[in-house]
Image (spheres, rainbow, N blue to C red):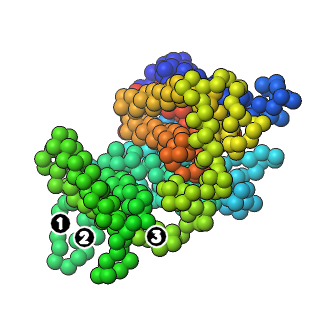
Amino acid sequence: MKREESLFGNIDWTLFIVFAVMVLIGIANVYSAAYNPKAPFLFDFSQKYGKQIMWVGFSTFLGLLVFLIDASIYRKFAIPIYLFCLVLLVIVLFMPPVNGARAWLGIGSMGIQPAEFAKIGTAIALASYISSINVKQQTVNTVIVANIILFIPVVLILLQPDAGTFVVFTSFLFVMYREGITYDPIVLHLVNLIPGVRFKKTWVGSHFIPILFVVIFLSIITLLMSNNTITFSFLPGIIIPGFFGVIGTLFVMSISSYFILRFFVAKRDRRRITMIVILGFVLSSLISSVVNFGFQGLRKHQKDRIELFLGLREDPDGEDYNRNRAMAAVGSGGFFGKGYSNASVASVESNHVPESETDFIFCPWAEEWGFVGSLTLTLLFMFMLFRIIQIAERQKATFNRVYAYCVAMILFYHYAVNIGMNIGFAPVIGIPLPFFSYGGSSMMSFSVMIYILLKLDSQRGDFLG
């Protein structure tokens, strides 16, 4: 039986207040980053800060609609919502390209990015599907269906192409892993196809995400040392790090593995972790070999960004200009910053940092408020993520919990990659900073994402499953 309650009676005010504070700070930051002395009025809708306020207002209206709708509607209509998002992703492929990508769906003089809203649709669809199955009795079909839900929008986004949003969509893999969706049934099925081989269980599929992480980490290490390599005639095309790279890597891996296995891993799992590291090292060598043979399948600007990010070459005034100027702006803020609207490197007048109000919105903030302001912003984001995880863990319904974890992972990816882009820790792939970057699509999608979570949490006792 549903509880009789007011519209906002059980809202998590802690999350809402943090969300509102971040939106307000974001508006102030956009005003500073895009300030036009000829149009100083904050509500001038011809300016980016005026438009940002308009998007915030429209997002608030959408939030009110979310709270007027019963929370169960999202699970009942999960598939129609998901299919609607897919239709938008297909339609946008036939639109004229903007900056080399077909990612915008024009509406009059304005436009939206369907990929931003596809994150919400995919999160709802995954939550609906996972809540409808018994993860303890997975089959090949259930694992495949869960991955197809993720795979279809990813393919459509890659066709745009939109590398940044593709990276964000990989966050759903961690949600699936958290909920117990593993690749064991598929691995077992493939292994048992081998004549004379019969396995009843395997650990490779259930450890797919850790293996993936080790492969990515070791691939980066291998690529960083790719200028000093050794090849073997009996392994044509296979590259491993040079002699000193091998010794150094194995030494660090051995020491790290010893402490991890000794103090943090149960004895029964130590052999598995060791195998994961060895497998990751081998696979990373194979991956780096493929990359070294021409970055097959990558566009030139994507190859350039990877090489620049890994430090394989330098081009501070060319392809690496944005990242180079962004790091200069962040560094110029010092410990306490230069004060509000006193940014020089990231200012509109200097134009040293392109897109300082969108992808590089962190630059003016860091320059104006320094290390203290950057730390404060980081703690604010981390507090929001921590609160969302708390909300996820208190849900009685699997649907609510999965959706909450999807929101947490999406926000974490955006925060980590965007800040990483601004300080040189991640390649420039065009990911907005939630609630801070200028843009209608991102502001509406992030806001609606939070509003739906607040609504689901406010009715967490109304339905289970």
Report which residue position mark 3 lands on: 292
Q: Residue furthest right?
A: 38
Q: In front here: 303 or 215? A: 303
Q: Which mark is residue 191?
A: 2
Q: Is there a contact, CB below 8 Å, between mark 3 and mark 2?
A: no
**Mark 3 to mark 2: distance in Å?**
31 Å
Q: Which sits earlier in the primary sequence, circle 2 or circle 1?
A: 2
Q: Amino acid at mark 2?
A: Val
| Residue 24 point in image, percent of width and height | 64, 24
Q: Quadrant of residue 49?
A: top right
Q: Which residue is mark 1?
A: 199
Q: Is residue 359 above or below residue 218?
A: above
The answer to whether the residue labelled 2 contacts the one labelled 1, judged by CB atoms less than 8 Å apart, is: yes
Mark 2 element type: helix
Residue type (three-letter) at the residue carrying disc 1: Phe
Badge 1, how many Cα within 10 Å: few under 14, some, many 20+? few
* SS under mark 3: helix
Would you call the spot at circle 3 few (<14 residues within 10 Å), some (14-19), or many (20 or more)?
some
Q: Relative to the observer, which residue lies in front, 283 or 86? A: 283
Which residue sits furthest left?
267
Give the residue at x 59% y 36%: 330
**Residue 62 coordinates in the image, percent (x, y):** 65, 33
Q: Is residue 216 left or right of residue 119?
A: left
Residue 252 position, x and y percent, is 27, 51
In the image, residue 259 sits, relative to residue 157, either above or below, namely: above
Q: CA distance from mark 2 to mark 1?
A: 8 Å
Q: Nearer the viewer, residue 335 or 24?
A: 335
Specify the quadrant that holds the C terminus: top left
Locate the N terminus by quadrant.
top left
Q: Nearer the viewer, mark 3 or mark 2?
A: 3
Which is nearer the N-term, disc 3 or disc 1? 1
